[in-house]
Image (tube, helix red, strand yellow):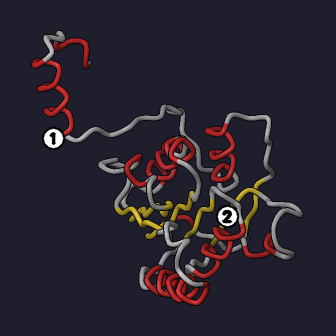
Amino acid sequence: MAGLVLEAIERILIIKLRNIGDVLLIVPTIRAVRERFPKAHIAVCVVSGTEEMLMGNPLIDEIIVCDRRRREDSFLKRISTEIGFIRRLRTKPFDLAIDLTSGDRSALMSLLSGARYRIAADPGNKGFLGKRFFYTKRSIPNRRLHMVEQNLEVVRALGIDTPDKSVFLSVSREDRRHVEGLFRENSIPEDAIK
């Protein structure tokens, strides 16, 4: 990516429009980005119903939810909703968009986010013609790797990596207290929840 000055990156959008397990598996990539950009604002865009996988994660500043549950709406209503979503996204001036989905929707979202730099795994001939040119940098995907490694390959194209590939789910104090109460009520030892 000629002309990319990583030090100038202040606002980052990471996109993963998949299921809950897929969203959880991007945590090492988020960690790699946070380690490289400790002061940057990192927003993660996910589809509705998957945001809980990232809530409370200290590596993330903002979760942006793309509502996909409106299938019963008319075509025009869905288009209007999508345009409204993109308008809201554009109010957040991103410098870098990292598309970990490489789907048609996420490619458009990456482009329309207004981010100057956009990276993803090269979609090849999948999806609509020309989609691969929506990105300013593409990594070469290796589908034989574990999904954690596939996600990391995208940011490695920028020289960003982490030795810590662990995945974690943040649990709020409130949720932990609730579970501890359930364990006490059912005479389950406290060390069973650690």
Q: Residue at x 50, y 61 (%)?
A: 47
Question: What whole-number distance in Å separates the C-alpha atoms at marks 1 and 2?
Answer: 37 Å
Q: Position of residue 194 (x, y in %)?
A: 26, 18
Q: Residue at x 50, y 33 (%)?
A: 164
Residue 119 - label: 2
Q: Position of residue 61 (x, y in %)?
A: 34, 60
Identify which amino acid the numbered label 1 is placed on: Glu
Residue 157 horizontal side relative to residue 89, left or right: right
Q: Residue at x 79, y 48 (%)?
A: 141
Instruction: Determine the secondary structure under disc 1.
Output: helix
Instruction: Determine the secondary structure under disc 2.
Output: strand
Front one among 128 and 116: 128
Q: Is residue 161 above or below residue 75?
A: above
How many marks on residues? 2
Residue 109 horizontal side relative to residue 190, left or right: right
Query: Callout 2: few (<14), some (14-19), or many (20+) C-alpha neighbours within 10 Å?
Result: many
Number of the front mark, 1 or 2: 1
Front one among 157 and 110: 110
Q: Quadrant of residue 172?
A: top left
Q: Position of residue 76 (x, y in %)?
A: 58, 90
Mark 1 or mark 2, earlier in chain = 2
Front one among 178 and 13: 178
Q: Is residue 104 above or below residue 174?
A: below
Q: Position of residue 111 (x, y in %)?
A: 64, 78
Quarter occupied by the N terminus? bottom right
Query: Callout 1: few (<14), some (14-19), or many (20+) C-alpha neighbours within 10 Å?
Result: few
Residue 14 - label: none
Q: Residue at x 41, y 54 (%)?
A: 51
Q: Is residue 155 above or below residue 167?
A: below
Identify which amino acid the numbered label 2 is placed on: Ile
Q: Which residue is mark 1?
A: 174
